[in-house]
Image (cartoon, rainbow, N blue to C red):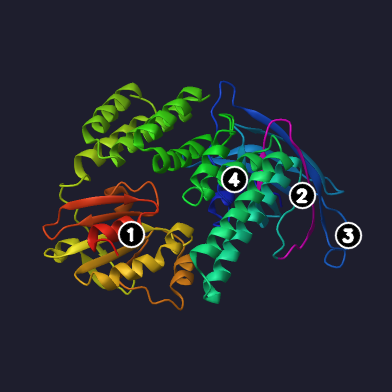
Amino acid sequence: MQMSHKFLLLLLFIVSAVPACAQRDVVTDNPEVHSVLAGTLTVDAEVDPIQDYRGFEVLVAKDRDGEPDTLGYAVTDSTGAFTMNVTAPTRGRYSLLISRRGRILKVGALAVAEGDTASLRAVFPMGNRPLRIRSMENSAWLAYENTTLQHRQSLLELVQSGEYNEAKVSGLVHQTSMILWSMRTTFAGTMGGEVAAAEAVAMITSWNDSLALARAREITPSNINYVEVAQAARRAQSRLGGQEAAVALLEAYAEAALAAEQRAALEFEIIAARLDSMQYGIALSRAYSFKEKYADTAFEDWGSRAIYELEHLIPGKDAPLFAVREMHGDSLRLADLRGQYVLLEFYHPQDDIYEREMEGRSALYADAPALEIISFSMAADSLINEAFFEERDIPGQHVLNPPGLALLYNINVLPTRFLIDPAGRIVAKYVGSTMTSVYQDVVGDP
């Protein structure tokens, strides 16, 4: 019996394997996009010899304010054929679900861009095989995903082999970023190509800042990850030319932006740049101006977060107190650590920046015995955390996916660290690849 359309929508967002719509949407004056998905869904003759393939339901949807929103829906005929017009609010990747007779058969994702025509052919049962959707947009995204997956696998193999060192990682990063950068021409005009190019900038930042800036200059505001490119370029420019040069670069990116969301994000990044350079008065003034400028919009809360940061989380302020359970179940309270220096670090186990700083972290722990290090894994997936700690003995105390702490400490970038003095006051905040700076501040020059 065919499921109701509403029930099918609910099932889509109950299934935990539904992939999120990845990457930032670019807002334009006319953002709505239209594409077509067509194909054939059949059943292996050994499983069902009748060869009547009607009743497969195909749904494309997104989450809108906690409620599922249909972008496209089709049902197969007796031959298993279907055609679906997809209308999406903007370019992006959206959840795709296939079901039949009240049973979910497969969950995947569809790249939707204006004018794209995609095809899907599948024979059930499929087992663990992924859905293969063919079109320029979906092929580009698959190439991007495969390249980044291979990069993570190569990093893991380096760690497991015991040959993980800066030279080998640098070579791998340069190689992967070159492959990603080439996709902007191989898959020109596609989301996958744009995201790959943006990733090529972000990945090479801190390894080769001059190359990162050169690439960033070639990326236009129409890129789906334009803001992320600007953020990476800011970090590179800051290291090469100082904070004022970085702010000037952000101002230029904001002026060239095509969408209100882009401009707001880049203006917010300027506040972050002023904060990072300890220009707290300028940063606070800009934060209040930002909040007033974007009052009654979705961006107003960004200003509130910046004001919170400047009023509660800058050096000299009392570190916000918390009580959590560490990974083995023991109670851990920040108030109980008064009288000693404490380093709080927020990270993600799959972040290669954190991975390559592990050696420096171990050196810090060994050379600063009076320092307590508390590490907060922000990975919500317990399997990711288990894999990270398997066969590793990482000194310090560890907390997994702590509820509310990201908000309490206004964590927006990983890794982020806070150094707290024996009186419980914040000494410094460190964002990104900063373990060398932490070591120098705590221990001194090696």
* Local secondary structure at mark 1: loop
Amino acid at the residue labelled 4: Leu
* Local secondary structure at mark 4: helix
Where is mark 1, residue-wise? 402
Q: Residues within 10 Å of mark 4 (few under 14, many from 20)?
A: many
Disc number lying in front (4 or 2): 4
Q: Is residue 326 visible?
A: no
Q: CA distance from mark 2 to mark 1?
A: 44 Å
Amino acid at the residue labelled 1: Pro
Point 58% across, 70% down: residue = 157
Query: Is residue 363 within the magenta segment?
Result: no
Q: Earlier in the sequence, mark 3 or mark 4?
A: 4
Q: CA distance from mark 1 to mark 4?
A: 31 Å
Q: Position of residue 182 (x, y in %)?
A: 68, 45
- Range of magenta residues: 109-127
Disc number lying in front (1 or 4): 1
Disc number lying in front (3 or 4): 4
Where is mark 4, residue-wise? 9
Q: Position of residue 53 (x, y in %)?
A: 83, 52
Q: Earlier in the sequence, mark 2 or mark 1?
A: 2
Reply above or below: 408 against 439: above
Reply above or below: 299 against 204: above
Q: CA distance from mark 3 to mark 2?
A: 14 Å
To which quarter of the image does residue 216 belong?
A: top right
